[in-house]
Amino acid sequence: MDRVDIKRLAEKLNLSTSTVSRAFRGNSDINPETKARILSMAKEFNYQPNHHASNLREKKSKTIAIIVPELANNFFSQAIHGIERVAREKGYHTLIYVTDDEYQKEVTFIDKLYNGRVDGIIMSASGEANDHQYLNRLDNKHIPLVFFDRVYDDIDVPKVTTDDYDSSFAATRHLIEMGCKEIAFLVINKSLSIGNVRMQGYRDALKAAGIEYETELVIDCTNDYDQNFEILSKVLQEQRPDGLLASVERLAISSYYVCHHLGIRIPEDIKIVSFSSLEIAPLLNPALSTITQPAYELGTNAAQLLFNALEGKAPGNDHVVLNSKLIPRTSSTGIKTTPGKRGE
Amino acid sequence: MDRVDIKRLAEKLNLSTSTVSRAFRGNSDINPETKARILSMAKEFNYQPNHHASNLREKKSKTIAIIVPELANNFFSQAIHGIERVAREKGYHTLIYVTDDEYQKEVTFIDKLYNGRVDGIIMSASGEANDHQYLNRLDNKHIPLVFFDRVYDDIDVPKVTTDDYDSSFAATRHLIEMGCKEIAFLVINKSLSIGNVRMQGYRDALKAAGIEYETELVIDCTNDYDQNFEILSKVLQEQRPDGLLASVERLAISSYYVCHHLGIRIPEDIKIVSFSSLEIAPLLNPALSTITQPAYELGTNAAQLLFNALEGKAPGNDHVVLNSKLIPRTSSTGIKTTPGKRGE
DNA sequence: TTGTATGCGTTATCAA
DNA sequence: TTGATAACGCATACAA
């Protein structure tokens, strides 16, 4: 009862395999009646064309890969959800790879994708901003690549990002307007594309306000919660900044823990704004001011660009920039507002 | 330069395709020297054995599928991360499918997986608890299936769940001990496995405490935020419960929004406990008491069971039960504690 | 240790 | 409208 292939089905129906095959292809000429017969028999025996055989024959896999630095993170899970939805609508399947922020894993993953397993790749980068010519091999294999959010500047492929510079600038200005004089910038890796751009927005906003930029206020953090707790504890006690711009959500969370732990009051002693896709930012204690990226849309846009390439209607090197939204809340304004129905 | 296949490589090396093939398979007899030659040449020309051809030949795909109701959710993204890690260690690739809580999509996905695309499936169910014989077709195709968290009782496959009944019982008892007399139970779908089991724990805890069970206090919610806001607003104003047990995280979030909106004080007016994998529960206003499931471990365990089946060392119908942890916080105790370093 | 030949399950080309 | 046949790229049984 198992192992039903096209041949078996053809025998049972007294037809040739080619005719049976045609029943499953949209275009081909085939008698509607026999097609119906075939499909009903296929259903009965639970037959489906073998995926690998088809793909070997057709030289495409109807599968794309998503590579992300982490998964248990609102931003990426929303983005992936967006990608998955578009892919599904296009009849594509979605492979997922998590690098845990380790560049080497990213390289390994990519390496395994040269062999025809996927038709295209959507990636948010884990490595630093430059020198990734190894990716160009994908081009030789005609496997299109699209970046979202975290990009490599030296690779010329379609990209979807948010207006990181502007957001960072606006957030910093906001903190200044709220009276902050000593604003720390929290970053995981300055060489990463987003860290870099976001820091520039921060610096330029300081400059525009006539505030001097101090290198000691740029705080290099890590991917480890406990380490960050130590780093931030030290900074908040020694440098005593009165404002904080977190370039990624995780660092704002750590800052909250540290402040609660040290008895530093938000926003009285320190005001905080963070890049974050946290839906419950308004429910935090205190409500967190965020730069909210349209994560889901970032995903759908990236997927759209990939399918453009896959369908051959690609200009080639689009760069879509979506707008984030600065949403000031209690953590920076001090104003206690009632959260809306779901956090607007 | 593109289109390097085993034949081309063999020609360049003056070898046969079989020898080249052997260089890539671990076991086969081959002269270490020629193997080295082949591999170096392969590297140079960026050759990798075609995935679909290999799989067609070997009749397995080294790929598994994960099917989940939603993605932008801490519980599932952590679980997926766990699965992905184990799969990667085993050299498997991971396809992901999101049903958006729609049972019909689940059926469609499964349907597409009969064709050899995957070797096994790990799923958290979207449908109700019974009558899913359609899944047994997988068995005919020898595609093992493992459930985690949300299971179908009528399907006899390995499962990984948490001690939902006990947790629910304990949480309810906790609320009673905190003085609650009218405890509402929030559920999305009573027929879903977890809704069902968790409700039973709630009912039995009431009974054990001599509190009468009132059907009006079991609140049927939906998957829609706005609808839930309306439903919960009504309940909190009309029934005025003094305790709340949310069977899924999302409903606790909605409750918070409603309470803030209506000026109902947590925990003075109402005490709240929720099933939740939210890492920042201690940072909420007020800190949310949770029943925390070991999401990541649920994932790794499920993956382990699947690979047991795949590797033929399967007893067949294990049911692993992991323990959740009831963590009382301000939302139910009223005691304001300082959050630990990262939420313990 | 290496080479030859066959088949994995499809689909496309061509002829009927 | 249908059927025969070759080819997709690889891995193995068997022969050398």
Image (cartoon, coloured by chain):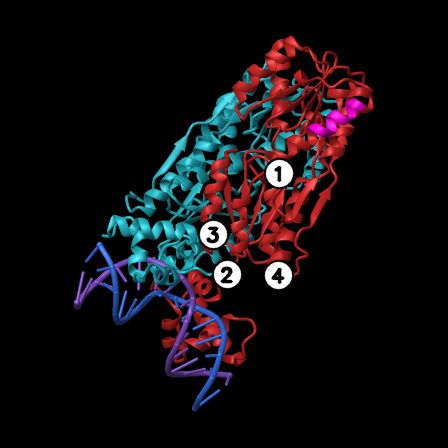
Chain colours: A red, B cyan, C blue, D purple
Residue on which disc 1 sits: A150
Q: From the top left corner, tell me how far across and down residue A252 is, in percent.
A: 64, 23
Q: Is residue A270 in sight in this rendering?
A: yes
Work out how far the residue at label 3 is from the one at label 4, CA to CA, in angstroms: 19 Å
Q: Which mark is residue A252?
A: none
Q: Could you tell me what secondary structure mostly forms the magenta stretch? A: helix
The residue where tag 4 is placed is: A311
B132 to the left or right of B253 = left
Q: Distance between the residues labelled 1 and 3?
A: 22 Å
Q: Position of residue A258 (x, y in %)?
A: 61, 15
Instruction: Judge whether A253 appears above or below B93 on screen.
Output: above
Looking at the rendering, the stretch of residues picked out in magenta corresponds to: A199-207
What amino acid does circle 4 point to? Glu
Q: Nearer the viewer, residue B10 or A308?
A: B10
First in residue order: circle 4 vs circle 2:
2
> Which chain is disc 1 placed on?
A
Q: Are marks 3 and 2 on the same chain?
A: yes
